[in-house]
Amino acid sequence: MFDIQEIRSQFSILDREVNGKPLVYLDNAATSQKPNSVLDVCHAYYTELNANVHRGIHTLSQLATEEMELSRRKIQKFINAEHDFEVIFTKGTTEGLNLISYILTQKLKKDDEIIISYLEHHSNIVPWQLLCERTGAKLRVIPIDENGILQLDYLDQFLSEKTKVVSVNQVSNALGIVNPIEEIIAKTRKNSDAYIVIDGAQSAPHFNIDVQKLDCDFFVFSGHKMYAPMGTGILYGKREILEALPPFHGGGEMIATCSFDGTTYAGLPFKYEAGTPNVGGNIALGAAVDFMNRVGHENIQNHENALLEYAQRHLLEIEGLKVYGEKAKRTGVVSFNLEGIGISSDVGMILDKMGIAVRTGHHCTQPIMEFFNIAGTVRASFAVYNTFEEIDLLVEGVKKAQRMLG
Ligand SMILES: *Cc1c(COP(=O)(O)O)cnc(C)c1O
């Protein structure tokens, strides 16, 4: 049973008003709201459990460690990783991608190639540019067509023995396009020895993830976009690969022995978790997974797809409104502009006055904006707690903005 009011009642923030109007929160691709069950876990951690993990023999330290390791196993199950130690806690997708690009430094040399796509978030572009600067490798970018769909024949052309990394997102944050990563992974495996990295920041909140079935080498996502606190995230990496690669940060927690003559590293996952982790946040990420499991992946997807379909249909009834990626397979996002209104933030400001939170601008994807020759878009993005009535309000708001700005 999918009871939207029951779900909404779990998110206290949805009861608040903004500018005298009930909040309509449609900026979920930037960050989702957090259910009370997750907030309760955060609060309980600091009121009942707070201690540093993995080193104390005292009771609180052991309890905190047990809870964090239990959360790791929940996340292992959530993405169907083979081992719990393949699940590394990070502070988000950006840290995960920087970590991967750093530890691969020794694996690349001059004129090797890294393949990404036009649809990437800046955090799946810049770390690879930095890796190119360190190694002399070159970046190749899979282009898109006018619907934002990746042109995979270019991937066929690009792939060679020079390809060392292929890194793409599963879902584009700017347009919501679902990329055919199964096909990308299959082509890459067939035609190169490249490491395959999937940016799952926009897919983990919506889809069932199975890293073993995908057969990717790395999969990264952020907790805060899937009902967990800010400053949480996950890096999944295949055991043999993580064991063979060097550490990222050095410090406490990641050593086996440390002396001035040399240091040996801890095994997985601790080798990649230097320093004191965000224990409360990491435990709460497990509670967010529990929340999603309780609602059910199928319910989440069905509801969000219905919202997207409804929003697109009604927005397109507005004359002069263009949806980017209109004909592509998408999830969770509708990104649009009004003809003759070049500045998306003007629309966003009028919507805000009506209590409606959307994102405007380039969404950390300037190459996509360049491709469409625009400065930005208005982006409405959905979570499991959004309603059709909220979309009606959005459509009314966009019509009003068009009258005011037109
Ligand atoms: C949000 C996002 C990122 C960056 O995530 P952070 O949580 O800001 O580190 C990377 N890629 C995509 C597709 C995103 O949506």
Image (tube, rainbow, N blue to C red):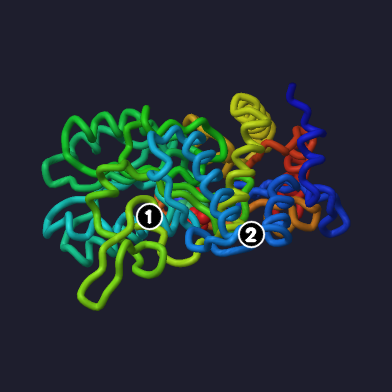
Q: Which type of secondary structure does the marked residue at label 1 adopt?
A: helix
Instruction: Tell me if residue 201 can be seen.
Output: yes
Category of crowding for the residue at label 2, using alpha-carbon neighbours closer than 10 angstroms: few (below 14), some (14–19), many (at least 20)? some
Residue 350, label in figure: none
Work out whether residue 36 or residue 52 is closer to the camera in this orientation and state it: 52
Report the residue at 30% width, 66% height from top.
257
Q: Residues within 10 Å of mark 1 (few under 14, many from 20)?
A: many
Q: Amino acid at mark 1?
A: Leu
- Write down the quadrant of residue 44 in the picture: bottom right
- Decide which of 28, 50 is in the foreground and name it: 50
Distance between the alpha carbons at the discs numbered 2 and 1? 29 Å
Whether the residue under disc 1 has CB within 8 Å of ligand 1: yes
Q: Quadrant of residue 211?
A: top left
x and y percentages locating residue 390 in the rendered image: 77, 39
Give the residue displayed 60% in from the left and 24% down from the top: 298
Q: Left or right? Give the position of 232 relative to 359.
A: left
Q: Position of residue 79 (x, y in %)?
A: 46, 35
Amino acid residing under circle 2:
Ser
Q: Tell me what residue is drawn at x 81 percent, y 33 percent.
A: 6
Of residue 56 and residue 379, the one placed in the foreground of this image is: 56
- Residue displayed at 39% across by 43% down: 219
Q: Earlier in the sequence, mark 2 or mark 1?
A: 1
**What label sits on residue 97 in the rendered view?**
1
Near-viewer residue (294 or 21): 294
From this viewpoint, which residue is outermost toward the right? 20
Q: SS for tag 2?
A: helix
Please indicate whether residue 259 sits to the left or right of residue 35 in the image: left
User: Eyeballing the image, is 190 above or below 17?
Assistant: above
- In the rendering, at what x and y percent does residue 310 appear? 68, 29
Residue that carries the numbered disc 2 in the rendered image: 345
